[in-house]
Image (cartoon, rainbow, N blue to C red):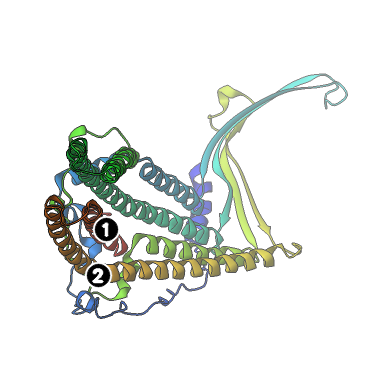
Amino acid sequence: MTNKLLLPFVMVAGTLTACSLAPRYEQPIAPVASQWPTSSGTEALTSGATGEQTRVADIGWRSMFKSPRLQRLIETSLANNRDLRVATLNIEAARATYRIQRSDLAPSINASGSGVRQRSSENSSTTGRPEITSTYSANIGATAYELDLFGRVRTLSSRALNKYLATEEGRRAAQTTLVAEVANAYLTYLADAELLQLTESTLKTQQDSYDLIKRSFDLGARSQLDVAQATTQVETARANRSQYQRHVEQDKNALTLLVGKEIDPELLIPEKLGSVSVMETLPAGVPSSVLLDRPDVRQAEYVLKGENANIGAARAAFFPSISLTGSAGYASGSLSSLFLAGSGGAWSFAPQITLPIFQGERLFSNLKLAKTNRDIATAQYEKAIQSAFREVADALVARATFTEQLNAQQALVKASESAYTISKARYAQGTDSYLALLDAQRSLFVAQQNEILVHQQSLANLVNLYKALGGGWK
């Protein structure tokens, strides 16, 4: 009998479907140009776009970064970085929240049992004598299940789903950022290590030059001014060495934080920037619509979809809400006879309808708030696209100029080396002053420093372009 009594209730709950009051979602038009801006330097990079080109988002980070040491650093960071771990746990939290919200679409069936013994006084008893009565019951039923006729629960579930999906995209965006940060931190470490090595070599050269001049001065062949100028160069090189020693150690600390654990010393053995293999040809000649595939842009769109669905819940609050409470089971005055014949057939059914009449503008304000949040999410989505467009455009402009700049810097180093060699020979012959030699030394040192920095920036630009085009999460 119990099953027969519950059957109509379950059928009503399962067959009634909701109409959605949420506005139809329409993806906003991307507020950027369809193609990347071009100039004389970027035309070669952005021309020749084809629909069959490989998207950067499909290029895994192992394909982008060929250096075994860098691959191990990235792999370790993906397993241990705490920011990425938090982003992953946020996905689990959002998934649980969505499942909780979705569970409201189905009635919750609970089993319950109760027992009551009470004593009535002589005056309250129907027999004029004190009485002790007992009541036992066992029921199964649902409590306050809302019939979602106007889609309030369903739209709240849709909002929770989009929040979960947005969190998942946020995790991917966090990974692309982490991969780029590890790569750039490693390149910075290598550049500073090269600068330290250059400074130590320069210091040794300056020290040898100082010792030679000092001996010549002791023999009366050089002036006190030459000795003072040589001393200045030695101390300048010594100060630069201390500076780059500090930078190298700080770079190690930055890498350790990103990796999330102590780094194997073998991975920190400096290698030349020129030995770091990075994919130099990225399919940049694609329309700007590829930005819609970036994890952070997709995250912003899921947030927008969630706020759009929330408008439906705010609209549904204007309509009546119907909830059902019902149970069926057994009741008896004796625990031993609770499940015997004659105890079954106890049931209750309590539908309830609530119609909002006066809410002090609460409902209208909630609806206005939901629409405003939707408009805010729209603006944030459009801003995410615009920011992504600028990142790619900036990286493309830089890509077009770094190759020429690096070639020019390398030519400058060769010219400075030649000038230094000639100046050194002329000074040894007494043709030039030591001041001219010092100027040639400084020019060579600055040119060598800038070559290392430009090389590092050129590689970092490839990393940033890879990230800006949505690569790094596979």
Residue type, mark 2 in image:
Thr
Observer-nearest of 279 and 446: 446
Quadrant containing the C terminus in the rendered view: bottom left
Q: Is residue 31 above or below residue 466?
A: below
The residue under the point 48% across, 55% down is: 160
Q: Position of residue 44 (x, y in %)?
A: 19, 77
Q: Quadrant of residue 193?
A: top left
Q: Position of residue 159 (x, y in %)?
A: 49, 59
Observer-nearest of 441 and 195: 441
Res 150 seen here: no
Res 400 seen here: yes
Observer-nearest of 121 and 87: 87
Q: Is residue 114 above or below residue 423?
A: above
Per the image, the residue denoted by label 2 is 401
Separation (CA) of disc 2 from disc 1: 11 Å
Per the rendering, the mark at residue 457 is 1
